[in-house]
Amino acid sequence: MATGINRQILLKSRPNGAPGPDNFELARSPVPEPGDGEVLTRTRYLSLDPYMRGRMSAAKSYARPVEVGEPMVGGTVSEIVTSRNAKFAVGDIVMGYGGWQDYALSNGAGLRKLDPAVAPVSTALGVLGMPGMTAYVGLLEIGQPKPGETVVVAAASGAVGSVVGQIAKIKGCRAVGIAGGPDKCRFVVQELGFDACIDHRATDFTRQLEATCPAGIDIYFENVGGAVQQAVWPLLNDFARIPVCGLIAQYNAATPVPGPDMSSVLRKRLTLRGFIVWDFAARQADFLRDAGEWVRSGRLKYREDVVDGLENAPAAFLGLLQGKNFGKLLVKVA
Ligand SMILES: NC(=O)c1ccc[n+]([C@@H]2O[C@H](COP(=O)([O-])OP(=O)(O)OC[C@H]3O[C@@H](n4cnc5c(N)ncnc54)[C@H](OP(=O)(O)O)[C@@H]3O)[C@@H](O)[C@H]2O)c1
């Protein structure tokens, strides 16, 4: 049985713009007692992650916000200190979502036992945890990297970005990181083995990025949005892929960011993919078979707007650009 005090960091108020210390409150309460089937865990490591900024806001998102007065949510690596659940023994180390507090109760659901022999247990919150998996699935499933391609990722020294670039290298790609400051950039190249890393705070950042990606960019793993995104987009190659993972540069924005609402691309998991009809030339026979049948059977209707005389083509065309046509615009030439 654990006695003593459980310190908790509560959400005290919701921030408008950048959060500050006043949005949090340190509270103390007695260490709770586990009920039947429950365990009491003592937090060893608490993960701090960008998504927590979203949980501080009441804005509709993919996850429920933290209520004012509740402890902040967070991934934890903890030790079982009391167990009334047969699946867990005192001393077990587990990954869970204990939140910003010394102790947490759990019924065991969502707890994953860790083996300290495999790797330091803290890695369950980073490279072998949610951020590492984010990098892995985002790059491999959505990015579809191919050998020789150029992969660009920002926040490259961070939890997700560091893994993105290293997996890109494992897959035979050229990995270009973007990070804040020369120390982070040096680490990304020298320790992590990226091919290059550019400081997004440098005054000539855009020029450096362009010079570092002479063959353009095939995968932009989006972690930040903002000014970095604007520098990257002109360099994207045909058929480039953009796993939209995070937009940290925008998380504190108090007013909508100009341009298309990329945050809804992320929040609603929208698929955004450009195409030109002839990318699918191989489907032409299928199209003619299906559409021909639908037109014949009346399931596919159409309307034509026919202009008489070739000499009227210019005016008709100019009208098309002003919405004057009603249906498929054609010129009857003869
Ligand atoms: N979709 C998902 O399931 C999922 C899961 C995990 C993480 N994420 C997202 O992945 C991104 C990286 O997360 P992480 O956990 O790996 O964090 P992290 O990279 O370890 O730490 C955040 C980094 O973001 C960069 N940053 C902060 N403000 C910035 C700004 N205004 N402009 C440009 N860069 C800025 C900073 O790096 P520099 O100093 O190098 O700029 C900072 O160190 C975040 O956007 C996060 O929300 C998404």
Image (spheres, rainbow, N blue to C red):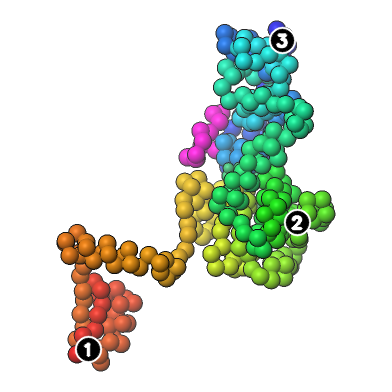
Disc nearest the viewer among 1 and 3: 1
* Of the image marks 3 and 2, the number of the one nearer the N terminus: 3
Q: Is mark 1 within 8 Å of ligand 1?
A: no
Q: Secondary structure at mark 1?
A: loop
The picture quadrant where one finds residue 125 is top right
Residue nearest the observer in this picture, 145 or 60:
145
Q: Amino acid at mark 3?
A: Ala
Q: Is residue 151 magenta?
A: no
The picture quadrant where one finds residue 10 is top right
| Residue 6 in sight | no
The residues tagged by marks 3 and 2 sit, at their Cα atoms, a distance apart of 47 Å
List x then y, in percent, for residue 170.
Answer: 70, 52
| Residue 4 in sight | yes
* First to last magenta residue range: 57-72
Residue count near mark 2 (Cα–Cα under 10 Å), binned few <14, some 14–19, many ≥20: many
**Residue behind mark 2:** 194
Q: Which mark is residue 333?
A: 1
**Residue behind mark 3:** 2
List x then y, in percent, for residue 129.
Answer: 66, 36
* Of the image marks 1 and 3, the number of the one nearer the N terminus: 3
